[in-house]
Structure formats: C-alpha cells, structure tokens
Image (cartoon, rainbow, N blue to C red):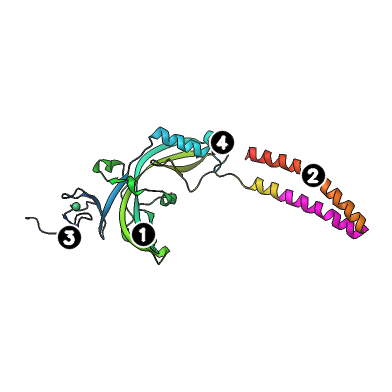
Amino acid sequence: MASPLPSTVLTCTQCGGELHPDEGQIFLTCPYCSATVYVDKSRVVFHWYVAPTLDEAQARAALHRWMSGNETVKDLDKKSQVVEVQFQYFPLWYFRVKENSRESIRLQPAAATAQTEVTHLQIPAGDLRRYEPSLDPQAVSPTVPLEAALEWVSQKQEKIAVVESALVHVPLYVFRYIFQGKPFTAVVDGSSARVLANIYPAKDELPYRIVGGVAAGVYLCLAMIPVFMGITGGGEDATAGFFVCTGLGILIAPLLLVWALWVAAKV
Ligand SMILES: [Zn+2]
C-alpha cells in the first residue's frame, strides 16, 4: 500500500479490516465487508438506520389521533394549527447493556434535542438496517460524543456493563403547531406512529381538583351533623342526625356527579 498509515489505525467493527476515512469523514462503508460504521473521536461503531413505515399523511393522522385523545387539552386537533412538518433521520446512541446478566437497550440522543422522549423509543434489533449515504441529506449529524453518552449511561447505574455501542438514525416527523398563539412541537416516530412530546397543552387539572375538593367538603359537613346532634341532644338525636345526613348525601350525590360531568365535557 502506497498511502501512509494514519496515526490512529481504525478497524472495521465487523470484519476488522483497516479503514482509512478522509479528513472529517464520519460515515463510512467498509470496503471489505460493506458494513456501515460511524467514526467517533474515540472509536468506530456500527451505524444503522430504521426505515420509516409511515408517510407524511399517516404521520399527520397519528398526530391528530393523539391530539384528539385524552392526554391533551380537549379538541386540540380542532383548536390548533400545524404550521410546519419536517422529516428527518435523528441520531441516537444505541447501547446494548448487561445488568445482572440481563440484557437491555439504552438510548441517548446523539444530537441536541428538546424532545428527550426520543430515548423511550422502542427499536427492535430486526429493524436495524445498514446506513446508506443516500440518507445523508435528511440525516442530522451527531454532535454528542460517544464518550459523553457512555458516561451518562453508566453513571445512572454503576452495575451496568455496555456490551455494544452503535449509532442509529431513526425516522422522525417533526410537527410544529400553534395553540392559543403559542408554538409547540410534537414528534411522530416514523416507524411506530408513536407521538413524542415533552411539552403540550395538557388538560387543566384545577377544575377537577375543585370538584373533588367541594365534594369532600360537602360530605365532611354532612358527616358532622349526627356528631353535633349527638353532642347537643344525646343518642336519639344522633340516630336522627344519621338519617338526615344519609338523606342529604343521597340528594347531593347526583348534583355533584352532574357538575363533574359538566367539567369533564368542558375541559
Ligand atoms: Zn468490514
């Protein structure tokens, strides 16, 4: 070979063949075994991607289902306006870890993102495909070093052993929408249709708490009636008080229920 060896010799994760990346080149295909790898400052790891199973219309439908569901404020699908949708392959550090002889997968974002929910994605090993250079225009480049992500994973639990590290680009539809004049972002996983959102217009819990608080207060007052009647008038009055309390309780229950239903319909 005519070309001089670089100061650090990189070897293919799969076949051990020597790799000679150009200056600044991070995504490589091994010339011997055609494995796709990512060249981090510290080491070479497998580079995979997950293919999307949803097109943009299907991702939009998944977003609308989530918006009209119970997690978000009522009628968010009708009251909000999607202003932008962008498809991207987002990079994740993929760690196969061993903990008490049990293996599991841990994910860490490999680029800055506000959607930390991406670490909860499920990536079945069977979905991993060799990364292709044709994906580059839509792929976000990793900015979080492998070292840092590794430290983060092992810091959380000390007894963890990282068996394998890899870089995985996952397909995401990033939706930006406006609700009551404020911008929000929701991400739809292009392979599972799962919606990932840290911050979204959630149901206001205060009206529910008010209903619950008032109901508890009313019944506490009712329960005090026989106690006071017993204290002031003796045993028979206590029994009478018990019936008054039960009767009022039965009368008030439907009113509280109607109120609760009204709140549930409004919020
Ligand atoms: Zn190779």
In the picture, the quarter occupied by the N terminus is bottom left
Residue at position x 50%, y 39% in the image: 66
Q: Which label's residue is closer to the chain start, 4 or 2?
A: 4
Give the amino acid at mark 1: Val
Q: Are marks 3 and 4 in contact (CB under 8 Å)?
A: no
- Of residues 25 and 127, the one nearer the viewer is 127
Residue 232 percent across, percent down from the top left: 91, 59
- In the rendered structure, find residue 250 and report the number of the disc placed on it: 2
Residues under labels 1 and 4: Cα distance?
A: 42 Å
* CA neighbours of label 1 inside 10 A, class few (<14), some (14 to 19), many (20+): some
Which mark is nearer the camera, 2 or 3? 2
> Splitting the image into 4 quarters, where does residue 10 fall?
bottom left
Residue 21 percent across, percent down from the top left: 18, 53
Q: Which label's residue is closer to the chain start, 1 or 4?
A: 4
For the question of whether residue 114 can be seen, the reply is no
Secondary structure under the numbered disc 3 in the rendered image: loop
Residue 143 is left or right of residue 240, and the answer is left
Residues under labels 2 and 3: Cα distance?
A: 81 Å
Residue 74 percent across, percent down from the top left: 58, 38
- What residue sits right under mark 1 in the picture? 97
Q: Which label's residue is closer to the chain start, 3 or 4?
A: 3
Q: Is residue 73 above or below residue 245?
A: above
Residue 205 is left or right of residue 243, and the answer is left
Number of marks in the image? 4
* CA neighbours of label 4 inside 10 A, class few (<14), some (14 to 19), many (20+): some
Residues under labels 3 and 4: Cα distance?
A: 58 Å
Residue 194 percent across, percent down from the top left: 44, 43
* CA neighbours of label 2 inside 10 A, class few (<14), some (14 to 19), many (20+): few
Q: Are marks 4 and 2 in contact (CB under 8 Å)?
A: no
Residue numbers of the magenta segment: 213-233
Q: Which label's residue is closer to the chain start, 2 or 3?
A: 3
Q: Which label's residue is closer to the chain start, 1 or 3?
A: 3
